[in-house]
Structures are given as C-alpha cells and as structure tokens.
Image (cartoon, rainbow, N blue to C red):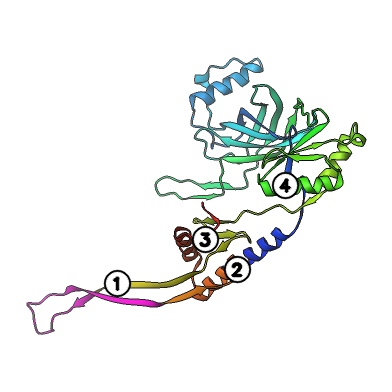
Amino acid sequence: MTRMFFLLLLSLSALVGAQASRIKDLTLIEGGRDNQLVGYGLVVGLAGDGDSNAATTLRSVANVLQRYGLTVPATDIKAKNVAAVMITADIGAFLKPGARIDVTVAAMGDAKSLQGGVLLQTPLLGADSRAYAVAQGPVAIGGFLGGAGGAGGATVQKNHPTVGLISNGGIVEREIPAQFVHDNQLRLLLQSPDFTSASRMVTAINAVYPNAATASDAATVAVKLPPEAVGREVPFIADLGGIEVTPDTMARIVINERTGTIVATSTVHISHVAIAHGSLTITVTSNIGVSQPNAFNNSGQTTAVPSTQTSVNESKGGFTIINDPPTIERLAAALNALGVSTREMMAIFQSLKRAGALQAELVIN
C-alpha cells in the first residue's frame, strides 16, 4: 500500500508539472495582501473549566463589570467559569466595514477547555495598534474534555479543547486602504519565486499585451497598463489573471519523518548508481521455567529457572543498478523491487544525497 501511494504521488506530480496554471493562482498583486489582527478578551460560561483564579483574569473580569457600572473588588470574583484568551484573525484586502471574518480563540491561562464558552466583544488590532474589527460569539472547539481526572479518575480528550473557532465571528469596522496601481503600473509577486517561471510569465503576458510586462527579479513581474485599460483596472486585472503559464518546478524531495510521507517532484533526477538493501534481525526471548523436586525428596524446594533463546535472521540484500532513464520514476520502481519500506526509502534518499547521486533538494521535516 505504501509503495502504491508513493508511485501515485510521483504520477500526480508529473501530471501537475505538465499543466499550465492561471497567473492569478501563481501570484499576488502588490498592495492587495491580507493583514493580521490580534486581540485579548474573555470567554465566559465554561462550567468550571476556566482559569484557576489567575490575577490577570480576575482583573479583566473586574474591568468588564466596571464598564457596566459595577465596582467589584477583584478579590471577590471567582474565575472558574471564565478564561483569558487571545484572538487572532486575518483580514483580507478590499474588505469593507460590515464584512464578516473568521476568528481563532486560544486560551492563554490554565483553562481546561473552552467548550460551550462565549467570547465577549473584543476589538481586534492591527500592527499599528488601531482596531480594524470586533469579535464576539460562541466558540466551537470541535472536540471535548471529559472525566474527573486525578487519582483514581480517568480523563478522555478529543482534539485540542483550549483552541476554538468562531465562524464569521468578526465584523470589519475599518477598511484597510489598498492601492494596487501606481503610475499606471501594477506588480505581480510570485508565490514561489523562480527566474524561469518569471520569464515564462513575462512571455505569456507580452503575447497578449505587447511590451507590457518586465521581470525585475525572480519574484516580481511589473505590468504596464495599456492605454485602453486606464480607468478600467478591474477588468484588465481579471483578464490578466486568466492568462495561463506553465511554471517551472524545483527538483525537490520532501520527507516527513513523523508520518512517513515522501513527496517528490517529477523533475528529480539521479546519476547512475547502484543500491544494495538488506536487514539483520536479532530476536532474544526470555522464559521462566519451574524446577520441581521429586515427590520422595523432602529436602528439595521449587525454584524458578530462567531460560534464554536467541535467534538471528538476516534477509538477503538486493543489489540493483539504476540505468537509464535516471529519473525519480525509475528510482521508485527500483526501490519497490527491493521491497523497502517508506522509512527505508528515507534512508536511501539521504545516502543518495550524501553520495552526490541525487540532483534535487532534500527537505526533511
């Protein structure tokens, strides 16, 4: 199953590499990016799962009550139903006041769970310390924490109960100004900077709008608005984003050791190389036997006798020579013939890189 999945990833990467993509899927327009917002607030109604009377939480509750004309000393407040949280959100470009955004809520104290809690209205600030949105609403955590815990108790947890989401829980209050056309020119920023991809993009744009595009570096393509597009920037950008380009793909193998996942691009090549694979397994088994005295021997006694058995199993190593074509598909077929597992493939890729036979970037997460 693992080998079939690995070959499927290689086949998909080859298909994707041969297809063209739209410019709008490969780039961002300078001046039209997202911005991050953050805020501090309180989640209430936690049924005893909140903070354990942290001083910061108690003062926050006292400040909220004072806002409504109630002066209560922090020492008289119990915070077991309240949790201090941090709220984060991304506000997209061109969003107008009244638009809704998703917000993420995370406990910053020792609250056990945010299940069933409601976030009180909280301003969300940008990097300039100005409020651009407010957030409020019930928190959905997609999991639970149950059980008494402690000595003799049991606790059952699903997912992460101290982080939740409020879908459409934020309301935009201030628009972030965005200007994407300067001096009748806009700049496209490649999401994966590459000189070849930038050059191909310039060629594709100039085929539709002659002499309109130039590449200043591997990540930036400047496009001049043609005379007929002045004052009609939105339709021009829509047409520009629909132009198809075949981006170049870096030769790269990404290995995730935690999950045993290997993803390789179709541009990976290897030199002529020979690979041998084998394994040695040593098994040691310990048993405890019983020595029972004879029935007529009154002086003997029952004793425990340990017994140890050792077995060695060495599988035969397969020696495979990788001939033409020196591609990742050929390497995968050869490794499958050796019957290696995913983790053994990782070790082989690392050895190939150290041997200088792998012409690709090797990324290990």
User: Of 181 and 84, which appears nearest the observer?
Assistant: 181
Residue that carries the numbered disc 1 in the rendered image: 284
Disc on the earlier residue, 1 or 4: 4
The quadrant where residue 354 appears: bottom left
| Cα separation between marks 2 and 1 | 40 Å
Left or right side of 287 for 23: right
Mark 2 Cα-neighbour bin, 10 Å: few <14, some 14–19, many ≥20:
some
Residue placed at 46% from the left, 65% from the top? 344
Residue that carries the numbered disc 4 in the rendered image: 199
Residue that carries the numbered disc 3 in the rendered image: 358
The stretch of residues the image draws in magenta is 289-316
Q: Secondary structure at mark 1?
A: strand
| Cα separation between marks 3 and 1 | 38 Å
Q: Position of residue 61 (x, y in %)?
A: 58, 23
Residue type, label 4: Ser
| Cα separation between marks 4 and 3 | 27 Å
